[in-house]
Image (tube, rainbow, N blue to C red):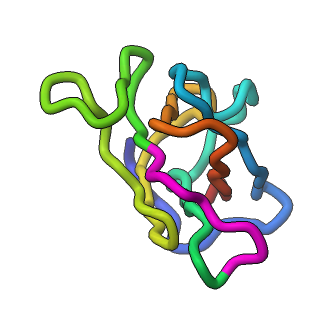
Amino acid sequence: MFIDKETVDASSLRNGHTTVGTSAQKLTDLTTKVVKGILLRCPGSVDPVSNTAPVWIGGPAVTADSSETGGIPILPGDSMMVPLERLDSLYVISTATNQDIAWLSI
């Protein structure tokens, strides 16, 4: 992906929350192409409702808490920027049910 702009038009931003469980699932089914990537955040102790477990991100075969196939964990209260082109290409999973991940395409 080549980033050729420093800013994005606010009308192109997309955002949402995804409830994550113990099976890998797409972050979103939106096929929107993004300019710079996606900002992800797991709610932590300062949020109205906090996650109790990390959310792992990766491709379609992502697993949670595995040294061989585990994705990158985002701990409750942490955030991560992922430079990707399509919103529907990212998968999430957790070791607990009813975890939340907030996202904002940029």
Q: Residue at x 54, y 39 (%)?
A: 96
Q: Is residue 70 left or right of residue 9?
A: left
Residue 86 point in image, percent of width and height? 57, 33
Residue at 51%, 51% in the rendered image: 37
Q: Residue at x 47, y 67 (%)?
A: 79
Q: Position of residue 43 (x, y in %)?
A: 62, 66
Name the outermost residue toward the right.
11
In the figure, residue 61 lies in which quadrant?
top left
**Picture layout, residue 19 above or below residue 4:** above
Q: Main secondary structure of the magenta part?
A: loop
81 relative position to 50: left or right = left
- Decide if residue 18 is on the left or right side of residue 69: right
Relative to 95, is 55 above or below? below
Q: From which residue to which does the magenta span run? A: 47-55
Q: Position of residue 95 (x, y in %)?
A: 45, 36
**Percent position (x, y) of residue 65?**
28, 36
- Compare residues 64 and 32 and report the one nearer the observer: 64
Vertical side of 71 occupied by 99: above or below: below
